[in-house]
Image (cartoon, rainbow, N blue to C red):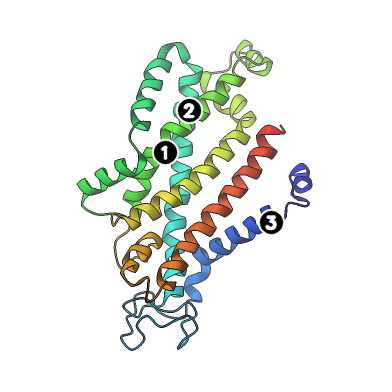
Amino acid sequence: MKNLIHQLRGQTLVWIALAVLLFWLFSALFGSAFIPFSYTAIDSEHVMVPPGTAGHILGTDSLGRDILSRIIWGSRSIFTVALFTSLLSTTAGVVLGFSAGYFAKAVDTIFLAAMDIIMAIPTLVLAMVVLGILGGSTILSLTLIVSVAYVPATARVARSVLLSEKEKEYVMAARIRGESHLYIMFVEILPNTTGAIIVEATARFAYSIMTIASLGFLGVGLQPPNPDWGMMVIENKEIITQAPWAVLYPALAIASLVIAISIISDFASKVLIHER
């Protein structure tokens, strides 16, 4: 922890990224208590009004819905899906990757072939096909589908870090003591690989946000009345010349959150891995 605080000194960009992340996290957790209007309220008298008009700080869209309220409410769903996607894909990836790396002779070839097949299918294509079959998107279905799509990449990272640790002296000592395979993998090795796994989980969090927003933009993400950020962009693309703010602000929300997490992930990589 002391090393982390020391590393943060003078890292202005990282502090800004942390501030942006905390802002959106606060918005997701408590923003609903501060939204000026209902995120579903249609106001036919204030359609496409510019920012700052009639109490609409960020303006309204083609139906007169308040942009700020919809962005704040939308942060809840995007954080929920992205966070649980990152946790699920990382957990499953670590279990699969550690198992493949530890029992390399028995399952490694099959594991690598299976992961390559899944990774050969683009995440968006896989998600669109499955969501099309299901006939609609919910927070649960989005979380599960995107998690499955990201497991192979995380599993490969977990396998790689385990292979770099499994022949070290502390692992050999655990084997001599007669410890079980599960104990060696998850009690001895896992604590020594947390840096790489945390970095991978952080990266998956950013990728998940982009995937969820992209699915919303393509119309197969969270369905109305959920104010999905990606869906907000596609909903208002027809009025971009008359009301550019209706497209600009949700797009900026996506970009700010993804860039902030990417900066934090890059910093974490330098501190937890490269300078280990």
Residue that extends furthest to the front in the rendered view of this protein = 241
| Residue type of the residue flagged with mark 1 | Tyr
Q: Which residue is mark 1?
A: 150
Q: Position of residue 62 (x, y in %)?
A: 32, 76
Q: Where, quadrant-wise, is the N terminus in this rendering? A: top right
What residue is shown with label 2? 156
Give residue 39's quadrant in the image.
bottom left
The local crowd at label 2, few if under 14, some if 14 to 19, many if 20 or more residues have their Cα within 10 Å, is many
Disc 2 + disc 3, Cβ < 8 Å: no
Q: Which of the two discs, 1 and 3, labels the residue nearer the N terminus?
A: 3
Q: Residue at x 68, y 33 (%)?
A: 274
Q: Which residue is mark 3?
A: 15
Question: Image point 52% across, 23% down: which residue?
Answer: 182
Residue 218 lies in quadrant:
bottom left
Q: Amino acid at mark 2?
A: Arg
Tell me the residue at 48%/28% (across/down): 156
Q: Is residue 254 above or below residue 267?
A: below
